Image (cartoon, rainbow, N blue to C red):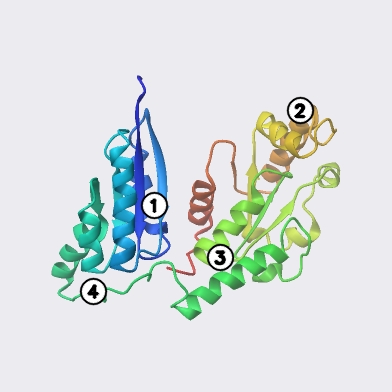
Amino acid sequence: MSKHLGRTVFFVSDGTGITAEMLGHSLLTQFEGIEFHQIIVPFINSVEKAQACVERIGEVARSGNGRPVVFTTLINEEIRGAIHRADAFVLDFFERFLGPLESELGVKSTHTVGRSHSAMDVKEYQNRIEAVNFSLAHDDGVSAREFSKADVILVGVSRSGKTPTCLYLALQFGIRAANCPLIPEDFERMKLPEAVALHRSKLYGLSIAPERLHEIRTERRPDSHYASLENCRHEVGQAELLMRREGIRWLSSTTKSIEEIATTLMQDLKIGRKTY
């Protein structure tokens, strides 16, 4: 496929910009061969800030690198109007969806800024913070205390993606996720660690292609037995054998994103999100 010229994309929000970026990125990924230079512009909560943003967008438009694309999730109509005057292709998510949704529901929206990513819902926010603290305290088998309180316990060889998946589950969904590495001693006994085996219904395994594991471990500890391809092949093979023998559901993290891993294990274990 021939390479298209790059385009600059702005994600403009009166809050963190996470929602605008998430929705916009979902659309941009459908266009192969175009290089997108992405700029997040958060906390545009006044007309003055909006005008400064419009000028910034205009500078890009005048640079001759193509018409900028702007994704916005702005609530205030005056601020939104200012952004719409930018020399750009503007996609306003709230304008396109909030009005029709109000008509369907027969209720006016609150037009409250930053509702989707804030600490306004104290209980929900506290749930996420507690879940993150739990995951940090029970990372990499450091402590088996309170495994009974975990929603899920990930097992797998070192550097297979357990820690980032646990933190994503905690921060995004308020899920208490712990993890425990499978180590050579476990393979020699061909048994799970006792503290982990007690919670079999909560276990979920991650595996990884030995070649990819070799690359990751080499960055961390080059020229070591730990990172050698031969050892990676041995550990992965033994871990998969152990998980099959123990009846643990598992997946390969080799080509999957953290989001895909988290969604798959939540479906497999029927874990519901604790936040919305």
Residue holding disc 3: 175
- Vertical arrangement, residue 262 with respect to residue 1, above or below: below
- Marker disc for residue 109: 4
Between 179 and 12, the one lying in front of the other is 12
Residue 186 pos. (x, y %) = 82, 47
| Amino acid under disc 3 | Ile
Mark 4 or mark 2: whose residue is earlier in sequence: 4
Label 3 vs label 4, nearer the camera: 4
Residue holding disc 1: 21
Mark 3 is surrounded, within 10 Å at the Cα level, by few (under 14), some (14 to 19) or many (20 or more) other residues, namely many
Mark 2 or mark 1: whose residue is earlier in sequence: 1
Q: Quadrant of the N terminus?
A: top left
Residues at marks 4 and 2, CA–CA distance in whole angstroms: 57 Å
Label 2 vs label 1, nearer the camera: 1
Left or right of residue 131, residue 230 in this image: right
Mark 2 is surrounded, within 10 Å at the Cα level, by few (under 14), some (14 to 19) or many (20 or more) other residues, namely some
Residue 105 pos. (x, y %) = 18, 71
At horizontal 50% and vertical 50% (from top left) the residue drawn is: 259
At horizontal 70% and vertical 67% (from top left) the residue drawn is: 147
Residue holding disc 2: 229
| Amino acid under disc 1 | Glu
| Amino acid under disc 2 | Leu
Residue 33 pos. (x, y %) = 37, 27
Asked if residue 137 can be seen in this view, the reply is yes
